[in-house]
Amino acid sequence: MNKLLYLAKRLVLGVPVVLFGLSMTFIILYLSPFDPMTAILGRDSDPQTARQLAVALGLRYPDGTPVPLWIQYKNFLVDTITFNFGQSWVVTRGQPVGQLVWERMPATVWLGFWSVLIALFLGIPIGLYAGLRSNTWGDYAASFGGIVWRAMPNFWLAVMLAGLLSAGGLLSFYRGFLIPTNVIGTPNALGNMLGSYQLVQGISIPVPNFYNWAVAFKWILPAALVLGSSSMGNEVRIGRTAVLESINAPYIDTAKAKGLSTRTIIGKHVARNAMIPLLPVVMGEFYLLIGGSVLVELIFGIRGLGNLYLSAIFAADIPIIGALTYVFILILVFFNIAQDIAYTFIDPRITLEGAGE
């Protein structure tokens, strides 16, 4: 089975996962105490207005009889899968949900991107170091730090860090360090990350606006540290265990007997094999970071998808809830497929040609 055929097979197998996730979303939303008319019009709404609104939302027929649940379910699936999310009911009433999600996505992607990089470039090297220096003070310090980072709840760490960085806090100097920025809210620089360079008269090409990149990075760094903290703790702990297992494996003794240098043994054998148990953890963290961004975005005042999701739940804005749930399900399926493909690059013994045989 070649890679393209395997990829096509995994995409097909992802369809039932998406349908199941959307079906559970429909059941939770439409069988819950959410009342769309009350959410939109308020508790003291006029019955006639509420009846007209129910017809407009597809919940009742013009004669007042309710639309069967299976028809609502079919309409929900078709509209969601085709990205026809409709308009917001409460949060930003009348605004297309697709436009709203698109506007909020850059902040969440920017936050998640740096959270993942921080977790990867701190957690994995520290875990590998602890495993290679087992039972030393460096190992004890790294292991203790990983446990502490893992144990601290994101919401508590976010509150503490936001307080320390605010005006009068112990770390308030950070806001004016090198580049004056804030730490609360959404960086405006995200909307202007690209500039233009004129090649010749009338012809220009987009180029990065490095100052705005620096502003956006410094602004989002505290929130990214908080969001990536638990992931970093996981990677330190699992990375250390994986290195210890690899070092004590028989093939390491064989490599030493062949006269390979320590650097070659660590780089080609130990580190590479230690990444195999780390990969599902790392790939799983991508999705968890998006889900964990809800509270972090709320505390740091970031107008991202997590903040929008929480606002939609409190306001019973079903179109936004359904749209964001669908987006998160697609992200989960994508990273699961990416994980299987990434295995083949880390471990040459794993191939896609034999998948499904």
Image (tube, grey):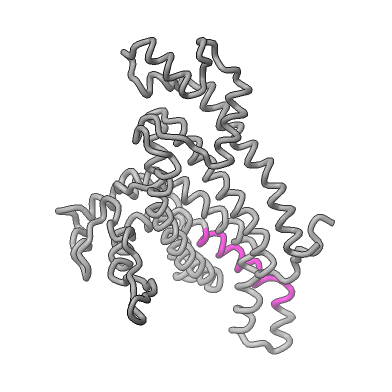
Going 37% across and 73% down the picture, which residue do you hit?
A: 207
User: 232 or 69: which is nearer to us?
Assistant: 69
User: 247 or 124: which is nearer to us?
Assistant: 124
Q: Position of residue 328 (x, y in %)?
A: 52, 45
Q: Is residue 34 magenta?
A: no
The image quarter containing residue 51 is top left
Going 59% across and 62% down the picture, which residue do you hit?
A: 241
Name the dominant secondary structure of the magenta segment.
Answer: helix
The residue segment tinted magenta is: 235-252
The image quarter containing residue 212 is bottom left
Relative to residue 217, is residue 333 drawn left or right? right
Going 67% across and 44% down the picture, which residue do you hit?
A: 15
Relative to residue 91, is residue 29 drawn left or right? right
Q: Is residue 347 above or below residue 330?
A: below
User: Does the rendering let one see residue 203?
Assistant: yes
Q: Position of residue 323 (x, y in %)?
A: 49, 39
Q: Residue furthest right?
A: 357
User: Does the rendering let one see residue 229?
Assistant: no
The image quarter containing residue 314 is top left
Q: Position of residue 357 (x, y in %)?
A: 85, 57
Relative to residue 177, is residue 98 drawn left or right? right
Q: Residue furthest left?
A: 168
Going 73% across and 64% down the picture, which residue do you hit?
A: 3
User: 31 or 221: which is nearer to us?
Assistant: 31
